[in-house]
Image (cartoon, rainbow, N blue to C red):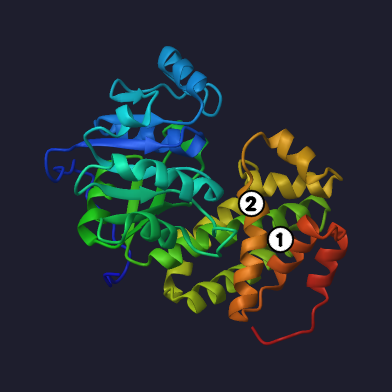
Amino acid sequence: MHNMTRQTSPSTEPMTPTGTETAICVIGAGSWGTALALQFARRGRDVRLWGRDREQLEAMSQDGENKRYLPGARFPQTLHPRETLEEALQGAGIVLVAVPSHGLRTTLVKIKPLLGKGVGVCWATKGFELSTGKLPHQVVAEVLGDELPLAVLSGPTFAREVGDGLPTAMSIAANSPDFAAELAGALSDETFRAYTSSDIIGVEVGGAVKNVLAIGAGISDGLGFGANTRIAMINRGLVEMTRLGVALGARQETFMGLAGMGDLVLTCTDNLSRNRRMGLLLAAGKSIDEAQHEIQQVVEGVLAAKAVKQVAEKLNVEMPICLEVYGVLHEGRPAAEAVRTLMSRSLKTE
């Protein structure tokens, strides 16, 4: 990976696209994919949006919005739902994959033969691949190779607020400073700021682990443990996230930034977070299936808890909060017992 130094803020002036292929294809028409497609289109880019549900794509074309996931966020004229991958990818200079982590590899395999020469590929997928313990960039490199411009887009962002055009900052980490700058320029305007980095591993680890910790914060709050317990879990959770990231080769300072502390605090403290809501519902006595049905979108932290546990054990990294959340999710551990166990651990220096 290229070693850029600190995160940098781009100019909000429109970027001149490299080459003639200026279209952007977004794969995944859930809330996050739709929100990012909206933001690219607001900047005047030709954007194609594709998802697996053809009926939903037809409805979006007719309605001029994604009524299922982002109702009320009207599509700019340059945002076009496409019913086939071939149509969506034809002539695209940038491809953004915004699918859940368990669908990343199969999606990449589908799009590989359709990618144009020199296309840049980025992803907004968060979480380790459960079967292999690999981060998204490793999966992308395995399927597509690592010679392409590659980048990860991460928080702290809620799709709903991006859809509504509320002021937002996000992080982009890429293997090429030029590609990072192009993406940042294609997204940034007076209400949206994209900051660039070269620490792909750090940004990805932050995005994966924060979802597990947010379930823990939701459980704690749902059980009425209070603000002191919540901040203790967030703070110590940041330590766990950093430990794992550094063990995987990330830079420690990344976790003090938007993709680390920023995304963690957002996801742990606001009820727009699906993972936090999962924790709240579990604390109220709902099963995972019942909670998932009520939330009606993929809650990444449920599977991420398994993957984080596997990777942490393999690397011998201590992650007690993530381990307790795993116990509640996958071993039937009572939620109140898990929180009490964490708060009664032996005292240590910070």
Q: Position of residue 306 (x, y in %)?
A: 67, 61
Horizontal side of 296 relative to 93 (left or right) equals right
Q: Quadrant of the C terminus?
A: bottom right
Question: Residue tagged by mark 1?
Answer: 230
Give the number of marks. Answer: 2
**Chain-order first, disc 2 or disc 1:** 1
Residue at 43 percent across and 68 percent down: it is 254
Q: Position of residue 237 (x, y in %)?
A: 63, 68
Which amino acid type is marked by label 1? Arg
Residue 305 in sight in this render: yes
Residue 168 in sight in this render: no
Q: Position of residue 221 (x, y in %)?
A: 76, 53
Up the image or down, 215 lies above or below 98; here it is below
- Mark 1 Cα shell of 10 Å, populated few (<14), some (14-19), many (≥20): many
Q: Report the residue that reaches farthest toward the bottom.
A: 349
Q: Quadrant of the N terminus?
A: bottom left
Up the image or down, 17 lies above or below 239; here it is above
> Along the line of sight, which residue is nearer the eye, 55 or 254?
55
Residue at 45 percent across and 14 percent down: it is 63
Which amino acid type is marked by label 2? Thr
- Callout 2–callout 1 Cβ contact below 8 Å: yes
Question: Residue tagged by mark 2?
Answer: 269
Q: Position of residue 20 (x, y in %)?
A: 12, 38
- Mark 2 Cα shell of 10 Å, populated few (<14), some (14-19), many (≥20): some
Secondary structure under the numbered disc 1 in the rendered image:
helix
Q: CA–CA distance between discs 2 and 1?
A: 9 Å
Image quadrant assignment for residue 234? bottom right
Residue at 29 percent across and 72 percent down: it is 5
Image quadrant assignment for residue 57? top left
Q: Report the residue that reaches farthest toward the front.
A: 113
> Along the line of sight, which residue is nearer the eye, 325 or 10?
325
Secondary structure under the numbered disc 2 in the rendered image:
helix
